[in-house]
Amino acid sequence: MFVLSDLFPQLESFLNDVTTTASKVPGFAGCSMWRDKDIPERYMLVAVYADLASADKAFELMSEGMILDRGYNLLETAPDNRRMLVSRQHGQDLAHTEVGELLSLSMRTSATGYGDELAAELDQIFQSLEVIPGYKGSALGPSERLREEVIGIVLWSDLKSFQSSIPAHVSYEIQLYERVL
């Protein structure tokens, strides 16, 4: 099992390398490291770009510099790399979060051709979350690869706020992460 204090210097160095490299690309807005609250061995790097061309260029530079390989080796796992095309953003954005804040993540898939309807449903849900104390911001949009996969992210100030947002019956997984770097 990973202990954050053991990994912290390496994760911090990795994030600094990613940030330094990505910041050379116009359109880079920021990045942060998050740790899964249920599976502490799972981490998520969130990088925010103005457009796909910027993200592609930063990824190319990180690949050339072997930065991503170092991250894979550090965590001893293959990454689940997903790119969300933000179609709705409200409140605090992902590029401006603080250590200790929480991020809830859901990835839902609709039947073929119904991605827009699923996104509209999530948009309504997210609008209702805006009134919950501790809600900080949200973003949603389709996956770049599969338009029927809609990714939703909500930022929370604390665990109580997140927990109050969960309905009695949820038919999809919601992962909760805490910003560690």
Image: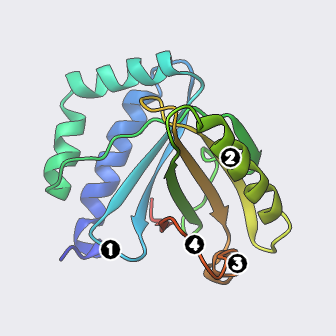
Per the model, the C-alpha gap separating discs 3 and 4 is 17 Å
Q: Which residue is mark 2?
A: 93
Query: What residue is rendered at 51% in x and 32% in y?
Result: 147
Q: Which residue is mark 1?
A: 40
Query: Rounded to the nearest whole Å, what is the CA distance between mark 2 and mark 1?
Result: 24 Å
Among the two numbered marks 3 and 2 on one chain, the one whose residue lies closer to the N terminus:
2
Q: Position of residue 109 (x, y in %)?
A: 49, 47
Up/down of 162 relative to 87, above or below: below
- Marks 1/4: CA distance? 23 Å
Question: Is the residue marked by circle 2 packed among few (<14), some (14-19), or many (20+) residues within 10 Å?
Answer: some
75 over 36 or under it: above or below: above
Structural distance between the alpha carbons of marks 3 and 2 = 18 Å
Amino acid found under the numbered disc labelled 3: Ser
Q: CA distance from mark 1 to mark 3?
A: 21 Å
Quadrant for residue 132, please give it: bottom right
Residue found at x 56% / y 31%: 113
The residue indicated by pointer 4 is: 170
Mark nearer the N terminus (2 vs 1): 1
Q: Which residue is mark 3?
A: 161
Q: Earlier in the sequence, mark 1 or mark 4?
A: 1
The amino acid type, in three-letter code, at marker 1 is Pro
Identify which amino acid the numbered label 4 is placed on.
Val
- Quadrant of the rendering where the N terminus is positioned: bottom left
Depth check, mark 4 against mark 2: the one in front is 4
Q: Residues within 10 Å of mark 4 (few under 14, many from 20)?
A: few
Tell me the SS state at disc 3.
helix
Q: In the image, is 12 to the left or to the right of 150?
A: left
* Residue 124 horizontal side relative to residue 179, left or right: right
Viewer-closest of 122 and 154? 122
Residue sitting at x 40%, y 40%:
82
Mark 3, mark 4: which one is toward the viewer? 4
- 67 and 164: which is toward the camera: 164
